[in-house]
Image (cartoon, helix red, strand yellow):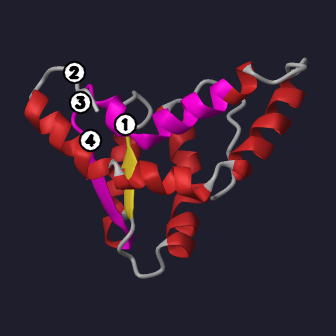
Amino acid sequence: MRPLIRLETTPTGDRYLDILTDHLLSCMSIVHSDRLGQFQQDNVTPHASRVATKWLQEHSPDFRYFHWPPKSPEMNIIEDIRDELLHVVENRSPPPRTLMDLWTFLKDEWYELPPRYLQTLIESMPHRVAALLCARVGPTRY
């Protein structure tokens, strides 16, 4: 697990580009030193911005970049991880009282996610892709 990154403001294409340049290459080189790693993101506006798209194209020799189809955020396993973290926060007693308490709690829980849970999400990808192909443009069930 790489560090969780806190965004202090609303993401824009330029801010997302800063995240890519500051974190993505180093992360990919550590996690996938064989250069066979695949980078995945959804199509939210900052991800699809011209500056981010251009940067990803320029750095495509450094890692594989898979462009997800529009309107398919359910294929991104980060959505499942976000939901799991939200569930843990909602069930915490006492709940975090400040943004700093919440941030500290989320960082701690991020590193406590069980490796088997993460592996299960990764292994679910072929099934998710098959469900998307079967649904064509409709919602998927898996």
**What's the distance in space between the residues labelled 1 and 4, CA to CA?**
14 Å
Pair 1/2: label in front: 2
Q: What element carries label 2?
A: loop
Q: In which quarter of the image is the N terminus?
A: bottom right
Please tell me in which quadrant of the rendered image residue 49 appears: top left
- On residue 118, the disc is none
Q: In which quarter of the image is the C terminus?
A: top left
- Residue corresponding to mark 1: 42
Which of the marked residues, 1 or 4, is nearer the chain's N terminus?
A: 1
Please, what is the three-letter code of the amino acid marked with disc 1? Asp
Which of the marked residues, 2 or 3, is nearer the chain's N terminus?
A: 3
- On residue 139, the disc is 2
- Residue corresponding to mark 4: 128
Q: Which residue is drawn at 48% across and 80% down?
A: 33
**What's the distance in space between the residues labelled 1 and 2, CA to CA?**
16 Å
Please, what is the three-letter code of the amino acid marked with disc 4? Arg
**What's the distance in space between the residues labelled 4 and 3, CA to CA?**
15 Å
Q: Give the range drawn in magenta.
A: 62-87
Image location (x, y in percent) of residue 21: 55, 56
Image location (x, y in percent) of residue 5: 68, 44
**What's the distance in space between the residues labelled 2 and 3, CA to CA?**
12 Å
Instruction: Give the answer, above or below, for where 37 lies relative to 93.
Output: below
Please, what is the three-letter code of the amino acid marked with disc 2? Pro
**How packed is label 1: few (under 14 Cα within 10 Å), some, or many (20 or more)?**
many
Pair 1/4: label in front: 4
- Left or right of 73? Residue 105 is right
Image location (x, y in percent) of residue 94: 90, 19
Please, what is the three-letter code of the amino acid marked with disc 3? Pro
- Left or right of 139? Residue 110 is right
The answer to whether one can see residue 38 in this image is yes
